[in-house]
Every structure is written in structure tokens, then in C-alpha cells.
Image (cartoon, helix red, strand yellow):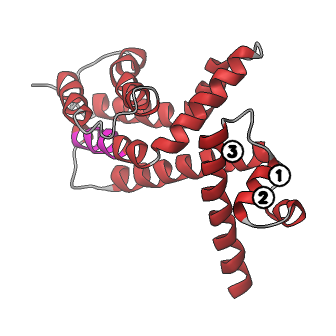
Amino acid sequence: MSIVVEHEKRRQNILEKALDVFVDEGFEDATFQKIADRCGITRTTLYIYFKNKKEIFNYSIKQLLSTVDAELSVVRADTNLNMADKLVRILSRIIELLEKNRRLLSVILDYLLHVSKSNGDPNYRVRRRTLKLRHILATMVIDGIKAGEIISMSVKAADDLLYPIIESAIFRLAVLKQESVGDLKASAALAVRLMTRL
């Protein structure tokens, strides 16, 4: 059991150091060797944990999304909250997690610019990664409408109202380099209140 714990601990350490390399070098110029050097290990040892830099990058994103997923599950299961309060709490928690992961957001932005320059489709990649989150928010809106807590509206209209708050947080943190975007929590609360029966 201790071997598994140590393996996971080292994996987390590699992810942290790799993030430093991605931030310092940019996604395109970061190499597997630079990551190994920053970690103080050989490339051969690094291969035990990850196949390549893309896998490290994807694993970092997957960890963030798993954390968001876990947070959403806890809030959705809270029977003491109505749907509007759940939506506000979820949006607020996502904003907090984005603030905590601002370095990863800047690397994701750099990666998406790299994809765009090489004639890839960054929109497809973003949508693929955020599909589950959008689905959960849509399901909550539908459940809120069914419960009579949210006004009847299309799921797309709700998505167009709520999701841009998350995008704004990402833009402010990754592009504008703001330290905090906590003010967007009030915007999230206002957006949800506009969706409810006042």
C-alpha cells in the first residue's frame, strides 16, 4: 500500500513541476527532458509515470475536471438547497477552483493558441472538455423548471446566461492575469436570480 501512496505522491510532484515548466517555457517549448530535469529525475524514470508531455498536460486537466465533478456532486446531493441555491453555489465553487488553478489556465490558453496556429480547432477541444459540466448545469436547470423554481426557458438560453460567467473568470485569470475574480460570484447569483420566479 505504501508503494501506491509513494507512487501517487511522486506523480503529483511531477505534475506540479511540469506545470512550472509549461508556465516558464510555454506548451510548445516544454519538453519531456525539461520536465524530467525540473523534477530531478531521468527521462526513463519519468516514463514510469507518463508517456509524454501531452499525457502530463491532459492528466492535469483531468484532475481539475475531476475536482469540479466531485464538488458538483456534493452540491447537487444537498437536499437543504433549492435548485437556484445549488446553481449559485456550484458557479461560486467553480470560480474558486479556477482561481486556485490559474497557472494551469494560462498553460491551457497557451496550448489552445498553439492548436489554433497549427490549424486545429480549439473550440472543439474546449467543448469536448466542458461537455459534462454543461450537461450537469443543463440538467439542473431542467430540474429547476420542473420543480417550478426556475422560469420556463430553453436550455440553450440558460447555458448562454450561465456559462459565460465561467468563461469570463477564465479570461480574467489567464489573459488579464487578475489575482481574484470573486466579484463574478455576485454576477452568478444575479444571473441565477433572473432565472427564478421572483
Tag 2 near tag 3, CB within 8 Å: no
Residue located at (90% from left, 63% from top)? 44
Label 3 environment density (alpha carbons within 10 Å; few <14, some 14–19, many ≥20): many
Element class at badge 3: helix
Element class at badge 2: helix
**Amino acid found under the numbered disc labelled 3:** Phe
Q: Which mark is residue 36?
A: 2
Position of 134 with respect to 140 (left or right) is right
Specify the segment rendered in magenta. 85-93
Using the image as rendered, state which of residue 117 and residue 135 is in the foreground: 117
| Residue labelled with disc 1 | 33
Label 1 environment density (alpha carbons within 10 Å; few <14, some 14–19, many ≥20): some
Tell which tag, 2 or 3, sits nearer the viewer: 2
For the N terminus, the quadrant is: bottom right
Using the image as rendered, state which of residue 108 and residue 68 is in the foreground: 108
Q: Residue 117 carries which label?
A: none
Quadrant position of residue 2: bottom right
Alpha-carbon distance for marks 1 and 3? Answer: 15 Å
